[in-house]
Amino acid sequence: MKKYSIGLMFLGLLLHGCTWVEPTTEGVNVRVVYLAQVEGCKKLGSVKVGVLDKVLFVSRSEEQVAAELEVSGQNAAAEIGGDTIVATSRVIDGEQAFDVYRCRQ
């Protein structure tokens, strides 16, 4: 039982520090803003992104999941020519929706 507990603790620490989503070269240039900040921008569409919120039966940190979803949203926006995203949903089961805008000329 003690080995099992130590293993779970190690897995939890390992997962806490893991980042599986890396920003792309284009994705790092995409801003994350609030809806009020996209006035005058052209809406290009919407994206829904997802990451693992659990590994096996261990839940990942809500902050880490949210951060990875944001990076995924930035990467997805860059793929369709956007430079700005606005979250349009809360994080639910490792998924989140974003509207994509082009604000810079």
Image (cartoon, helix red, strand yellow):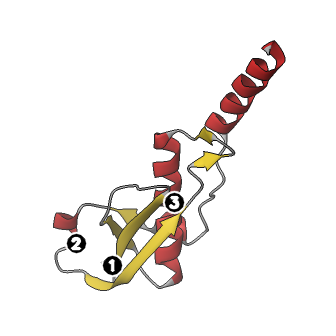
Q: Residues within 10 Å of mark 2 (few under 14, many from 20)?
A: some
Marks 2 and 3, how far apart at CA: 19 Å
54 sits to left or right of 105: right
Going from N to C along the chain, the mark reached first, 2 or 3, is 2
Q: Nearer the viewer, residue 50 or 105?
A: 50
Marks 1 and 2, how far apart at CA: 7 Å
| Quadrant in which the N terminus is drawn | top right
Please say if 25 is above or below 60: below
Q: Determine which quarter of the picture holds residue 44.
A: bottom left
The amino acid beneath tag 1 is Tyr
Residue 20, image x, y percentages: 66, 53
Residue 56, image x, y percentages: 69, 45
Residue 10, image x, y percentages: 74, 26
Q: Nearer the viewer, residue 31 or 53?
A: 53
Q: Determine which quarter of the picture holds residue 7.
A: top right
Q: Residues within 10 Å of mark 1 (few under 14, many from 20)?
A: many
The amino acid beneath tag 3 is Val
- State the residue position of label 2: 38
Q: Nearer the viewer, mark 2 or mark 3?
A: 3
Q: Nearer the viewer, residue 101 or 51?
A: 51
Residue 50, image x, y percentages: 53, 63
Going from N to C along the chain, the mark reached first, 1 or 2, is 2
| Quadrant in which the C terminus is drawn | bottom left
Q: Are marks 1 and 2 in contact (CB under 8 Å)?
A: yes
Task: Return the mark for residue 101.
Answer: 1
Task: Return the mark for residue 71.
Answer: 3
| SS for dot 3 | helix
Please say if 96 is above or below 16: below
The amino acid beneath tag 2 is Val
Q: Residue at x 61, y 69 (%)?
A: 25
